[in-house]
Image: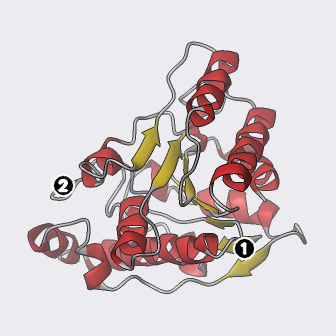
Amino acid sequence: MKILFHEKFYESDYANNGAADPGRMKAIMDVVSKDNDFEIIRPCPADEDAVLLAHTPHYIDTVRANPKLCDMALLATGAAIMASDIGIGGEPAFACLRPPGHHAYRESSWGYCVFSNMGIALLRLRQQQRIKSAFILDFDAHTGDGTKAVLSGWTDCHILNPYADDREAYIEIIRNFIHDIPTVDIVCVCAGFDSYEKDVGRKLSTSDFYLIGDMMKRFARRAAKNRRFAILEGGYYQPDLGKNVLAFCHGFM
């Protein structure tokens, strides 16, 4: 399985927020990089033409006014794009990136997000006529409202942000939703590990992240010719962040 990661993601001076916390990416890569099942691939920044698929020129200019933030955001989007290219080829990929993107709208963003990493990656695949449909599971503790907005109007793009009072019901919602989708061109995951029982979401266990990854793998095998990729969104409880990402990736691979 390919892990998309650039050493620039270790830098935390591009912003002052939870996603940019020092040590956050190190907490993940210290665990994931030691696993021989993964191959670390260095991504390249996205170009402006790709970003324009999801965002207006005015918004891009606004982001560009902060060069450090813009450089990091373009690299994050580039990692998502490379993960989607690998995933559409039938090999699973996980983009370990920041800043996240599921709260990025066409002309604005909030919640630590800048560019719609998932939205851009999928709109690019559709523009290239490599897909006509997609499924996105967003298991972040917060709704991926930006992703929904950027991809609105695409009737064959199914997006699930599960809501439930407990972990068992949460997993069951995912299982029931994908059961009703017979086929899709690619399976995608916005992986937000702040849904962890010790993070702000106060819900999922480490074993649940493995189970969700495994469910998405099996769904991709059944319905999407094995095509799947995932990108990092939230996740802020650093002591367990690495093992949670590792659990998901082991299930997903």
**Number of other residues with Cα within 10 Å of mark 2, as a class: few under 14, some 14 to 19, many 20 or more:** some
Measure the C-alpha gap from mark 1 to mark 2.
31 Å
The kind of residue on which mark 1 rests is Lys
Using the image, determine if residue 50 lies above or below residue 206. below
Answer yes or no: is residue 127 visible: yes
The quadrant the C terminus occupies is bottom right
User: Callout 1: helix, strand or loop?
Assistant: strand
Q: Is residue 58 left or right of residue 209?
A: left
Is residue 77 rendered to the left or right of residue 47? Answer: right
- State which quadrant residue 5 falls in: bottom right
Q: Residue at x 21, y 70 (%)?
A: 63
List x then y, in percent, for residue 236.
Answer: 57, 44
Quadrant in which the N terminus appears: bottom right
Secondary structure of the residue carrying numbered label 2: loop
Farthest right residue in view: 36
The residue labelled by disc 1 is 2
Q: Quick one: label 1 or label 2, which is nearer the N terminus?
A: 1
Quadrant in the rendering for residue 107: bottom left
- The residue under the point 62% across, 57% down is 224
Whether residue 41 is situated above or below residue 171 in the rendered picture = below
Picture disc at residue 81? none
Residue 150 lies, with reference to residue 69, above or below; the image says above
Percent across and percent down for residue 46 are 39, 82
Where does the image place residue 120, in percent across and percent down from the top left?
36, 67
Residue in front for this viewpoint, 188 or 39:
188
Residue that appears at 88% across and 67% down: 35
Residue 108's label in the rendered image is: 2
